[in-house]
Image (cartoon, rainbow, N blue to C red):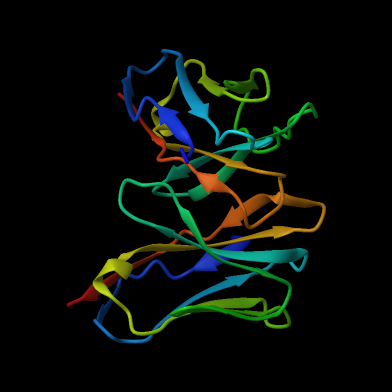
């Protein structure tokens, strides 16, 4: 079992839909949780960062962390065609928090 | 300001040859990271530099891989005697202090070993 599991999709939704992206993990030492967006042929860019459990909202994006279930989510409201990209979850542990472990990414397409 | 830059953007090499990949971090960032992104494995940590501290090389897949960071700025990732399984996108990131949630990635170098 990989440390971080992420459904690769692809996921296709109509413009304006609410998108839910998820990752599960097995390492209980993970404390820091991130979501990155990666456009084709580009490097990942950080969308959301959360420490430990809880919710965080930034505009149309909401990140949730449930450490008891080892489950993290990213919600995108009012999705736009410009949101079409690969979404990567990443996490790291206390003591080596710089060393990110990534999911394999979910490819999202938002259709106009 | 300028982001992380990497060169070359694409590299095609023959099996058995050595390659050098370059990373220019964001000015003032003390931490620098190398990752590898391949279809089968996703994005994997390779090595981490922080200031003058000894680097964390725990992610390097074999002794054919090495990296240097000169003057606390530019970094070079060297792969010796390349193999076809080394084909991947090599991504560099930098951050101000080495904490999570602040790594800025470059566009990557796409390496193809024929």
Q: Quadrant of residue A77?
A: bottom left
- Image spot of residue B18 (x, y percent): 45, 14
- Image spot of residue B86 (x, y percent): 44, 31
Q: Is residue B42 above or below residue A68?
A: above
Please name the residue shown 80% across and 58% down the image.
A94
The residue most toward the top is B17
Query: Residue B77 or B3: which is nearer the viewer?
Result: B3
Please name the residue shown 34% across and 84% down the image.
A78
Count the marks: how many? 0
For residue B81, side relative to residue A94 (left or right): left
- Image spot of residue A83 (x, y percent): 33, 69
The residue most toward the front is B1
For residue A12, side relative to residue A45 (left or right): left
Q: Is residue A57 above or below residue A105?
A: below
> Can residue B105 be seen from the camera position used here?
yes
Please name the residue shown 43% across and 24% down the image.
B83
Q: Is residue A66 above or below residue A94?
A: below
The residue most toward the left is A112
Please name the residue shown 42% across and 14% down the image.
B16
- Image spot of residue B63 (x, y percent): 63, 22
> Can residue A1 be seen from the camera position used here?
no
Q: Quadrant of residue B71?
A: top right
Figure quadrant of the C terminus of chain B: top left
Q: Is residue A51 above or below residue A93?
A: below
């Amino acid at each position: 079992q990989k440390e971080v599991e992420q459904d690769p999709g692809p996921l296709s939704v109509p413009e304006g839909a609410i998108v839910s992206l998820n990752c599960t993990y097995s390492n209980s030492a993970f404390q820091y949780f991130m979501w990155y967006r990666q456009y084709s042929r580009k490097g990942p860019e950080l969308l959301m960062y959360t420490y430990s459990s809880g919710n965080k909202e930034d505009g149309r994006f909401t990140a949730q962390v449930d450490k008891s279930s080892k489950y993290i989510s990213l919600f995108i409201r009012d999705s736009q065609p410009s949101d079409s990209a690969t979404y990567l979850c990443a996490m790291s542990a206390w003591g080596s928090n710089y060393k990110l472990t990534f999911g394999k990414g979910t490819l999202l397409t938002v259709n106009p | 300001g300028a982001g992380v830059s990497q060169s070359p953007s694409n590299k095609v090499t023959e099996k058995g040859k050595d390659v050098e990949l370059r990373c220019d971090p964001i000015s003032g960032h003390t931490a620098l990271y190398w990752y590898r992104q391949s279809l089968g494995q996703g994005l994997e940590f390779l090595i981490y530099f922080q200031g003058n501290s000894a680097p964390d090389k725990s992610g390097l897949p074999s002794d054919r891989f090495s990296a240097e960071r000169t003057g606390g700025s530019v970094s070079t990732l060297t792969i010796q005697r390349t193999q076809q399984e080394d084909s991947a996108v090599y991504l560099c990131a930098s951050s101000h202090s080495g904490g999570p949630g602040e790594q800025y990635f470059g566009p990557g170098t796409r390496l193809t070993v024929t």
